[in-house]
Amino acid sequence: MIPAPAPSFPSGVSLRPRDALVEEIAQLTHGASYEIAARDTVALQEAREYIAPGATISITWMPADTHEDRVTATQAVREAGYEPVPHIAARRIRNEADANDLLARLADAGARRLFLIAGDVPKPIGDFASSLELVGRLRKSLGAFEAVGFGGYPEGHPAIPQATLQSELETKIAVVEDAGLSPFIITQFCFNAAPILTWLAALREHGSIVPVRIGLAGPASIRTLLRFARVCGVGNSARALAGNSASIARLLRETGPDPVIRKLAEAGVRKEFGPVALHFFPFGGLARTAQWVAPVTRGQIRLQPSSSGFQPLS
């Protein structure tokens, strides 16, 4: 079932706190984006009944991906009625000619937005070591696109100091804006709202009003989430997740991002730090994640009495 528009309440109605919270959760979740692997467009077909037309679908760059995989996936996402956002990994690009060829093919395939990352390989295969180098040297080649995005790191990066991350992000945003394009940010996924809120506050204090999509892991077993967290270098909130999951039974149990979403909604994240939306990493499967999200966007949830989350109502 495709999500309906986020709910609205009649003007003049005095909302009880719980009603207002449900609406805020729905509004925050409405318009969420998702991530797929370039070689897994079948997953998108399986999830189509739960994802509204026009939704943003990011196409991650896996180690074995080729340029052809990226172009084919971009075209498949566009033909399915969604907005493709292919990732470009700087350390996996040979040179400017290689990059320009890929950009031209992606534009022809229907990409209007790009997401630039360094790419998690220890040594570049070519001339680019970072997304900053890539966007700086390809500035004139980005004219076929409307928006360019970069990663945000509420929990920091295992190999890059936070001050460097902030400085380079500001520079990349400036380069994109100077090129007449719209910058955006997608953050790493977190299992705790606190570092997200702290990071957003720091970003806005530096004067940036760039749209931010907050990365969250879709519903999956805690063991699966811990495995991806270890690979992706997400630290403190993953340890908190593990600390709450001591037994084998709890490790096998599925958990969702509802506690984080609820905390963000309670903090009024859209009002305090907007424009803000959500981005889901579907480690338990795209269809499962989209099916979980769909009723939340309609406000069809039951708040947990413990204030620790909510339950979607199918």
Image (cartoon, grey):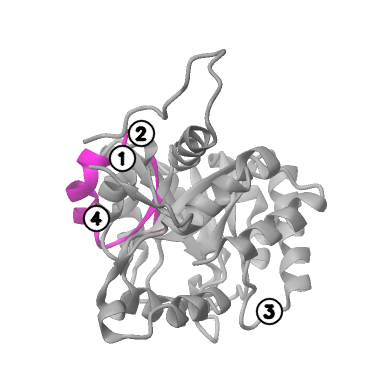
The dot on residue 298 is: 2
Q: Is residue 31 magenta?
A: no
Counting the numbered discs, the total is: 4
The amino acid at mark 2 is: Arg
Q: Can residue 197 be seen in this view?
A: yes
The residue at the point 37 percent across, 63 percent down is 67
Q: Distance between the residues labelled 1 and 4?
A: 12 Å
The amino acid at mark 1 is: Pro
Q: Which residue was labeled with disc 4?
A: 288
The region drawn magenta spans 34-59
Q: Which residue was labeled with disc 3?
A: 160
Q: Which of marks 4 and 2 is nearer the N terminus?
A: 4
| Foreground residue among 168 and 24 | 24
Residue 152's x, y, as percent? 62, 61
The amino acid at mark 3 is: Ile
Q: Earlier in the sequence, mark 2 or mark 3?
A: 3
Q: In this view, does 1 lie above or below 102?
A: above
Q: How crowded is mark 1: few (under 14 residues within 10 Å), some or many (20 or more)?
A: many
The amino acid at mark 4 is: Arg
As drawn, which residue projects farthest toward the front?
A: 305
Asked whether the residues under the numbered discs 3 and 1 touch, taking CB atoms below 8 Å apart as contact, a structural biologist would say no
Q: Residue 309 falls in which quadrant of the image?
A: bottom left
Quick check: 163 left or right of 52? right
Q: Can residue 31 be seen in this view?
A: no
| Foreground residue among 44 and 251 | 251
Asked whether the residues under the numbered discs 2 and 1 touch, taking CB atoms below 8 Å apart as contact, a structural biologist would say yes
The residue at the point 54 percent across, 36 percent down is 17
